[in-house]
Image (cartoon, helix red, strand yellow):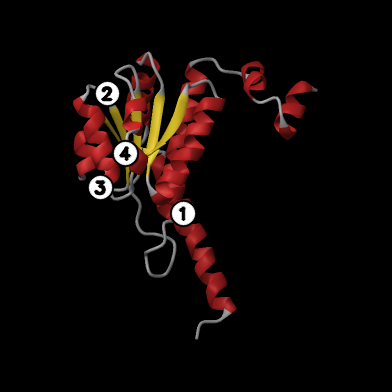
Amino acid sequence: MASLDDGVSAGLEALALTADAIGALHARSADALRTAADLVLSCKGALVVTGLGKSGLVGAKLAATFASTGTVAYFVHASDALHGDAGMVTERDVVLALSNSGETPEVVAFARMVRDRGVPVISITGCGGGSSLAALATVVVDGGFEREGDPHNLVPSVSTSVCLALGDALAITLMTAQGFGPDDFKLFHPGGSLGQRLSE
């Protein structure tokens, strides 16, 4: 039976793997961030974020970050999209689809639905361009990494951290390009400690 010391060692290894994976993004993400941001900035509608499972949870957080930093955005769960919520997406929008494998059936189906209606798709996957989702995407953001953080390479951990980091990087790219500053942020975020700090 494993001990607590074994558990702590595994947890520290997970931190190291995550740090390495995020650190590697810097050297390969500039072109994808530029292209993705240009696509979002040129759209006349909203940025619609979608995903399923852990990627869906990351997507909901990212949609909130985009919305609070000057990019009109909302989250549509990929399963709900296949039961009518795809109607929320218009030809004026851009879809950001998240799937580590790039093969999540609901995410791929949703991406295909909107692409067939002429809606551009940005994908973040751990497989780079070699997946069904990437094949449907106008822009592929490479979220590749060596392995997940747990000893069995199973638990979404490194993959979700990488996806979150790339999504946040895109949000920061967009807010900076749009000149979104503290006064703008204050309008959207008057509550909590951030709102209090901006009011001082």
Secondary structure under tag 1 reads helix
Distance Cα–Cα, label 1 vs label 4: 35 Å
Residue contact between numbered discs 1 and 4, judged by CB atoms under 8 Å: no
Return the x and y of residue 15 as percentages of the image width and height. Answer: 51, 58
Q: Nearer the viewer, mark 2 or mark 4?
A: 4
Q: Residue furthest front?
A: 84
Tell me the element at label 3.
helix
Q: State which quadrant residue 106 falls in.
A: top left
Mark sitting earlier along the chain (3/2): 3
Q: Quadrant of residue 146?
A: bottom left
Q: Is residue 106 visible?
A: yes
Q: Which amino acid does label 2 sit on?
A: Val
Height in image: 12 above or below 179?
Answer: below
In this orientation, does residue 129 appear?
no
**Mark drawn on residue 105:** 3
Badge 2 density bin: few <14, some 14–19, many ≥20, Cα 10 Å: many
Relative placement, left or right, of 130 versus 84 is left
Label 4 SS: loop
Disc 1 vs disc 4: which is toward the camera? 4
Q: State the CA–CA distance, disc 2 to disc 1.
A: 33 Å
Where residue 110 sits in the image (x, y, percent)? 27, 36
Q: Name the residue under label 4.
A: 83
Q: Mark 2 or 1 closer to N-term?
A: 1
Front residue (pair 58, 167) = 58
Identify the residue position indicated by label 1 in the image: 18
Which x, y percent locates residue 140? 28, 35
Q: Where is residue 26 in the image (x, y as percent from the top left)?
A: 42, 38
